Image: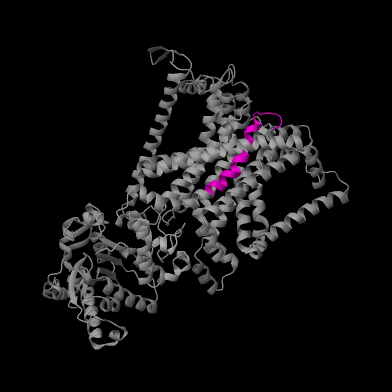
């Protein structure tokens, strides 16, 4: 959004980091972590407060490091949404990680960790393929307005197709399980990357391109030396969205293809047994969320490493 | 401050002696940052500006002229000294809406028509609708843009947008107009034309104007006084009275007195430059080795 | 203006026409009954045949999508306004919101079903609202805060109050950002509704219908439903675009002028 007038470059709310900015950056990161912790604590407090007011009766008979805790409480109100089946106690969810998933088997936490890793690998593979496809499309569209006008509506439309509807067909078509999961993950990934890459490749200052043309540079040279470096921040904002999408794609793909070793089947499995052990499904959800955080966090780190020392424009619209 | 400045700090305005003091700066200083990162943007600023004057602030980058303007406008606060606007604190002056501001970027709102852009401060200050429309129409006539009342900012050229920005700044009859290189983004011809227009507006409204600029010809052509500033730290080094006739036309730019004054300002600026070019250690070394 | 619009859309329409015709003709000529992706004419026939069921599904799923969309957008906008207002809240809540948006919402689908029961519309509405909430909130905050500093200085010089600055400067500035999020939200809403149904819903809901038909290898009808879901998503997207043109006529005029 611009406000008309002037030749000053658009400065967004955040000041450029100058000398002494390193300290500020570290301080703000620390503040953000503290903020995150506070939010989590508040969330837990609200969660348990709701259960205290309107959940199922509390009956805690446990001992923590030798200290016995006996607590019984009958909540005054009755909210179905706060009962133990809908929203288990936080400590029950925590305990579910430690308890064995199957009789005599390893703790749920370990099992979920393995499944999370598996899903992450598939998501990563899908991410790489989708990302490559997205970048290729973007490069194509930048160089050919005709191709852009002809194909972009379908790129956009492709995302309106509910992936879950296509997934079964992909599974049947591709026959191999892991290939289907990859395809689904890549399908969800390529779109945000295409859009972000297109914006980034186009965000180049036209005068820089004119300069290169005056050196009789080829289109490929312009691409490599000018467009790609400029597009890096935009690419990374697209990668963040794509990372989250690839995990969703991997989970959906696993569920449709019936892949047993990933989080997708874990979700289906614990959904079946929800009535007897709701904490397990919640634990799985927590692990899925964690995988999402880690993946996007890794992208952020990669961005910081790759753009070290360079001016990074603050993100604009999504 | 040189003897020149001490005498001229009240300057030509003594011709209008007795007119109210609009801006009074006493030993004003501004330091940004703390500790080792502290930067003294301004130091020991003494300045008196009377009603009806047109004062230009000119100097190299980093001399604090924009900072001084922002101090007057209460967008930032001084770290030392006192600043009185219309015999009030800058904040009170701002709350009383005593001044209007024009920046280098016209900062017009895309989503409003030209007329509505001019009405913006009036809306905020609570003027009734018919009063707003009347004032906007008057100002459009003043800046000769009546035909564009219902257009949008992007349909206008840079010079026209700045005229709208000036009209907007004047819409609530401020006694003081603060302008920060408003014509900096325009080409030379448009700039000269805008100078003439600004002067005619100034004469018709009698507003006091404080004008920051990089351009020596512009400063001399427009002002009753030119305040020359030096950098590191920002100080007033000289104040030069511009005794050109009150009615300034294109021919004024070609008069002998005009060139004399432009030369005076230029030399004042170069003096500052020469003085600060050398780091004291390097200066000592060069002197010691007889290279100076 | 129409000539420019035609030039803009012609290549895409041509591609569409060519693909459909080629698909139909190739399969017809080869005499092959493509199993997974039937001929367009076959799909069309199935669409007509199953219309009554499909129409019910469209209404059902469509309602979930639209209601969830409205709820999510409303909550997201309000949260965005609140977050943008207080700088300290912004520093903490914005990264949290961005982080929360990385959680695969789909993982929550079974849980919402357990909350509200299979017969209710609420599970999917909740999921759609959750999916839509984050882009809208994040973009609202960005739009409200990404204002040119000179414009803010101008408002300060007018001694404008916080609410005046919000109404006259920040809100109009935020509109393009908000509409970008709205476009994303419309496509997400249909996807969320259909995906949510995968975990449970009435037989005629599009999600369950597609799953059942695919499961029985009745691909023509499955594809008919998929195409309808697609059309719904595109339709909502176009509504968002139309709304944007209505609310921000100056943007379209500006783009035309360029």
Camera-side residue: B214 or B127? B127
**In this image, A142 relative to C168: left or right?**
right
Q: Is residue A286 magenta?
A: no
**In this image, C193 relative to A5: left or right?**
right
Camera-side residue: A303 or B79? B79
**In this image, A38 relative to A182: left or right?**
left
- x, y percent for residue A33: 39, 38
Q: Is residue C91 visible?
A: yes
Magenta stretch, residue numbers:
C180-204
- x, y percent for residue C105: 56, 35
Q: Residue at x 65, y 53 (%)?
A: A153
Q: Is residue A41 above or below residue B78?
A: above
Quarter occupied by residue B72: bottom left
Quarter occupied by residue C69: top right
- x, y percent for residue B96: 24, 56
- x, y percent for residue C168: 40, 53
């Amino acid at each position: 959004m611009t406000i008309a007038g002037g030749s000053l470059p658009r400065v967004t709310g955040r000041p450029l980091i100058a000398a002494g900015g390193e300290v500020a950056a570290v301080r703000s990161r620390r503040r953000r972590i503290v903020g995150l912790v506070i939010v989590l604590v508040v969330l837990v407090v609200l969660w348990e407060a709701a259960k205290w007011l309107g959940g199922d009766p509390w009956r805690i008979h446990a001992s923590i490091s030798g200290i016995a805790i006996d607590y019984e409480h009958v909540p005054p109100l009755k909210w179905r949404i706060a009962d133990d089946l809908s929203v288990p106690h936080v400590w029950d969810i925590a305990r579910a990680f430690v308890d064995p998933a199957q009789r005599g088997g390893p703790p749920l936490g370990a099992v979920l960790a393995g499944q999370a890793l598996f899903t992450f690998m598939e998501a990563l593979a899908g991410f790489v393929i989708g990302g490559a496809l997205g970048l290729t499309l973007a490069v194509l569209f930048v160089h050919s307005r005709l191709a852009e006008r002809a194909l972009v509506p379908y790129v956009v439309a492709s995302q309106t197709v509910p992936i879950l509807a296509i997934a079964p067909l992909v599974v049947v078509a591709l026959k191999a399980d892991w290939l289907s999961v990859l395809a689904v993950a890549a399908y969800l990934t390529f779109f945000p990357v295409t859009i972000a890459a297109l914006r980034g490749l186009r965000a180049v200052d036209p005068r820089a391109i004119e300069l290169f043309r005056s050196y009789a540079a080829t289109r490929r040279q312009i691409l490599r030396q000018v467009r790609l470096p400029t597009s890096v921040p935009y690419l990374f904002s697209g990668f963040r969205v794509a990372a989250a999408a690839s995990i969703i794609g991997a989970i959906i793909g696993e569920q449709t293809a019936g892949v047993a070793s990933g989080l997708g089947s874990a979700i289906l499995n614990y959904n079946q047994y929800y009535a007897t052990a709701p904490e397990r499904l919640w634990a799985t959800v927590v692990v899925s969320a964690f995988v999402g955080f880690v993946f996007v966090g890794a992208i952020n780190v990669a961005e910081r490493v790759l753009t070290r020392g360079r001016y990074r424009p603050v993100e604009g619209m999504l | 401050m040189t003897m020149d400045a001490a005498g001229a700090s009240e300057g030509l305005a003594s011709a209008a002696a007795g007119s109210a003091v609009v801006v009074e700066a006493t030993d004003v200083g501004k330091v940004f940052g703390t500790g080792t990162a502290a930067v003294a943007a301004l130091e020991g600023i003494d300045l008196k500006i009377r009603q009806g004057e047109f004062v230009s602030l000119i100097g190299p980058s980093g001399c604090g002229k924009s900072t001084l303007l922002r101090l007057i406008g209460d967008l930032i606060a001084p770290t030392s000294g006192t600043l009185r606007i219309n015999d009030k604190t800058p904040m009170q002056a701002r709350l009383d809406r005593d001044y209007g501001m024009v920046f280098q970027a016209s900062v017009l709102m895309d989503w409003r028509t030209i007329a509505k852009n001019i009405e913006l401060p009036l809306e905020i200050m609570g003027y009734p609708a018919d009063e707003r429309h009347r004032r906007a129409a008057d100002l459009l006539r003043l800046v000769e843009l009546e035909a564009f009342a219902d257009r949008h900012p992007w349909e206008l050229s840079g010079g026209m947008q700045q005229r709208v920005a000036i009209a907007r700044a004047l819409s609530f009859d401020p006694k003081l107009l603060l302008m920060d290189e408003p014509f900096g983004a325009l080409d030379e011809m448009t700039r000269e034309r805008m100078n003439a227009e600004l002067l005619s507006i100034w004469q018709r409204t009698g507003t006091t104007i404080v004008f920051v600029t990089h351009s020596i010809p512009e400063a001399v052509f427009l002002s009753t006084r030119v305040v020359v500033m030096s950098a590191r730290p920002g100080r007033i080094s000289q104040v030069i009275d511009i005794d050109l006739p009150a009615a300034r036309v294109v021919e004024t730019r070609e008069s002998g007195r005009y060139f004399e004054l432009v030369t005076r300002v230029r030399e004042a600026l170069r003096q500052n430059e020469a003085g600060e070019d050398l780091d004291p250690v390097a200066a000592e070394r060069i002197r010691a080795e007889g290279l100076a | 203006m129409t000539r420019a619009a035609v030039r803009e859309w012609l290549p895409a329409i041509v591609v569409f026409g060519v693909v459909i015709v080629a698909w139909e003709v190739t399969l017809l000529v080869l005499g092959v009954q493509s199993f997974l992706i039937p001929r367009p004419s076959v799909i069309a026939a199935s669409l007509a045949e199953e219309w009554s069921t499909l129409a019910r599904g469209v209404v059902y799923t469509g309602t979930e999508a639209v209601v969830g969309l409205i709820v999510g957008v409303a909550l997201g906008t309000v949260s965005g306004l609140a977050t943008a207002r207080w700088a300290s809240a912004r520093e903490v809540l914005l990264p949290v919101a961005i982080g929360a948006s990385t959680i695969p919402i789909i993982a929550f689908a079974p849980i919402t079903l357990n909350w509200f029961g299979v017969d209710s519309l609420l599970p999917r509405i909740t999921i759609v609202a959750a999916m839509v909430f984050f882009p809208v909130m994040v973009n609202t905050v960005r739009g409200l805060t990404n204002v040119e500093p000179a414009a803010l200085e101008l408002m300060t010089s007018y001694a404008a109050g916080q609410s005046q600055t919000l109404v006259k400067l920040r809100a109009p500035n935020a509109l393009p950002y908000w509409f970008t999020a709205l476009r994303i939200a419309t496509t997400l809403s249909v996807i969320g509704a259909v995906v949510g149904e995968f975990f449970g819903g009435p037989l005629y809901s599009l999600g369950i219908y597609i799953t059942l038909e695919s499961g029985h290898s009745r691909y023509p009808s499955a594809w008919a439903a998929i195409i309808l879901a697609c059309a719904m998503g595109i339709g909502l997207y176009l509504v968002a675009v139309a709304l944007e043109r209505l609310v921000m006529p100056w943007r379209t005029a500006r783009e035309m002028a360029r």
